[in-house]
Structures are given as structure tokens and as C-alpha cells.
Amino acid sequence: MIVARTAEELAAVPHHGTRVVVMTMGALHDGHLALVRRAQELGDQVVVTIFVNPLQFNEAADYERYPRTLEADCALLESLGVDAVFAPGDEVMYPAGVPVVSVSAGVIGTVLEGAARPGHFDGVVTVVAKLLNLTQPQVAVFGAKDAQQVIAVRALVRDLNFPVAIATASTVRDPDGLAQSSRNVFLSPSERESALALSRSLQEADAAAQAGRSLADVVAAGREVLSRAAGVEVDYFSALNPADASEVQGDYRGEVVIAVAAHVGATRLIDNVTTRIGPPEGAVGAEGELQ
Ligand code: PAF
């Protein structure tokens, strides 16, 4: 496995077949391994980037104490058969400190998770743009669990014409449905039980959507589950337009990302499901009527 630390070392890594990139901030866990496996399914050459991006942290202290475990991360990636790692330092990514030109996530960066973390998604799309330019992949894989990040990255690629396909790796779940997260270790046994309400609320909403119910009914079905859950303080339970993370309203029909964020005790958890309101795409009858 090649470990490149500079743009020049990375550029010297020969491409073979379809190159797929997985972007990480290191301190790798099972969620990252699922991304690597998905990348290996999708292409011939997997490049993993490891860079703790200062632009996406709201608190300097959080950035400073973010775990940096490069040696262990590289050993793990090598054992998985990853072809190359790009692990640049700050001086490679931001030689002049904060960049003069950067990318804005626009309205996507101001709602939901973005409202709680101003500037976070601008920092994410800026580093993703730089890493796409540096790694030159045909495909980039992101975790579906971070739904708003996926929406922001897809918008970046669409609106700025990056020649790359964005793929997602499904959220890894425990057998009872709880989305795996490094924060789950902070849950007491009773909080963990309460936290199941998040995935259940999404299952109910998805079931209602698949049964052909209206947007209002779908959202109500999910919120009803949360309203009955003890110890769960909901930040939002919203149906989002996958194009721009705006909340869909009224008689909207089409694909939606239903996203939930809630505090369970002191731990803030997020989860989401992608579903469809209204008939399946392309379900057109002989008369041209939607079925
Ligand atoms: O999801 C992450 O770990 C980060 O936001 C990413 C995509 C690597 C950008 O720094």
C-alpha cells in the first residue's frame, strides 16, 4: 500500500481501472470499513484520504483533541487491501492557512445540522473539492448516515461540474436497528433502549410512504413514534428535498430524505432514511396517468 503525504507523491501513484476514493478524518472504525468495502465493490483501485480538516470544526478545542491515529489507520487499511492512502498535513492542504478562495454549501449549510454548526458544511465541501481535485477519482463513496453531508457533496459535484460519481454506503445498524455511531458508547442501557425510537420512527415513516400515504401522514407516522418515546428530546424530524436539504411541504411527491436528530440523555444522535412520496418513478399507465 502506497502512503502519499504530498500532492506530488499522490500524483505519482499510477491509476489503474476505476479509481474510487473514500475520504476520512482517520481514527477509523467499523463505519469506515463499510465505506472501504463499498469502494472495493465499485472499482479497481481504492484510495483512502486521511485528513483532519480544520475548516469544518466550530470549536478549536474539538479540532485539537480530534484523535490522530495514522499508524494504526494505515495498518488497518493495508490489511483490507486498500491500494493507496493520501495523508497530507495542513501545510499541504492549506499552505497559506485559511484559503483565500473556498466553496460555500449555500442554503444546505444553514439548515438542520448546519444551523447547529455554522460554517461546518462550507468547510466540508471545500475540503471535498480539494481532495477530489487531488485524488482524481471516477467515484467517491460517502456514508449514508451523514445525509446532509451527502446532499452537500452531491450539490457540489452537480453545481460545479466535478467529473465524479457520488456513491453511498448504507448505514451500518445493530441487529435491533440502532444506527452505529461512535457516540453510542455514551448511552446507558436504558438510554440505548430509548434511542431505538429513532430508527423505529424512520421505519414507520418509510412504511407509510411505501403504503402510498401523503407527505403529511408519513411525517406524522414518524413523529408519533418519537412522541411516545421516553427520554428522547427531538431536535428535528423532517422530510428533506435530496437536491438541497430544504424541507418539503404540502403535496410534494418524489424522493425524500427523512432525517431525525434527537438528544437521548446527553448524547445527540442522528439517523435518516431515503424513501419516496407518491408512486414509484416512471410508473406511468397506458393513458399517461400516474399509477
Ligand atoms: O465525513 C467525514 O469524515 C468528513 O466530513 C470528510 C468527508 C472526510 C471531509 O473532511
Image (cartoon, rainbow, N blue to C red):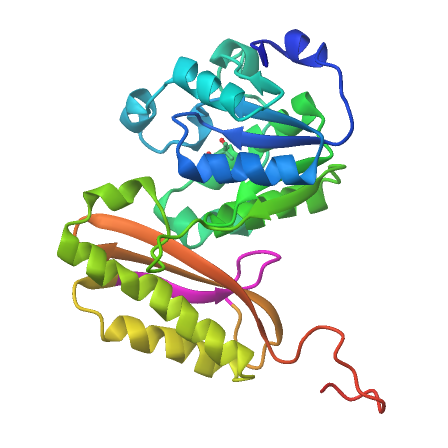
- Left or right: residue 174 versus residue 247 is left
Is there any visible trace of residue 83 in the rendered image? Answer: yes
State which region is magenta.
234-247
Q: As rendered, which of 264 and 125 lies closer to the eye?
A: 264
- Above-or-below relation of 187 to 256: above
Q: Could you say where residue 61 lies in the image, as x and y percent from the top left?
A: 27, 25
Q: Could you say where residue 58 lies in the image, as x and y percent from the top left?
A: 35, 33
Q: Residue at x 39, y 33 (%)?
A: 29
- Left or right: residue 122 versus residue 18 is left
Spot the residue most to the bottom: 287
- Above-or-below relation of 171 to 27: below
- Left or right: residue 223 versus residue 195 is right
Magenta segment includes 240: yes
Q: Residue at x 53, y 61 (%)?
A: 246
- Above-or-below relation of 226 to 49: below
Q: Residue at x 41, y 67 (%)?
A: 202
* The N terminus sits in image quarter: top right
- Left or right: residue 174 versus residue 80 is left
Q: Residue at x 34, y 44 (%)?
A: 181
Q: Could you say where residue 90 lies in the image, as x and y percent from the top left?
A: 48, 14
Q: As rendered, which of 235 and 40 lies closer to the eye?
A: 40
Q: Quadrant of residue 178?
A: bottom left
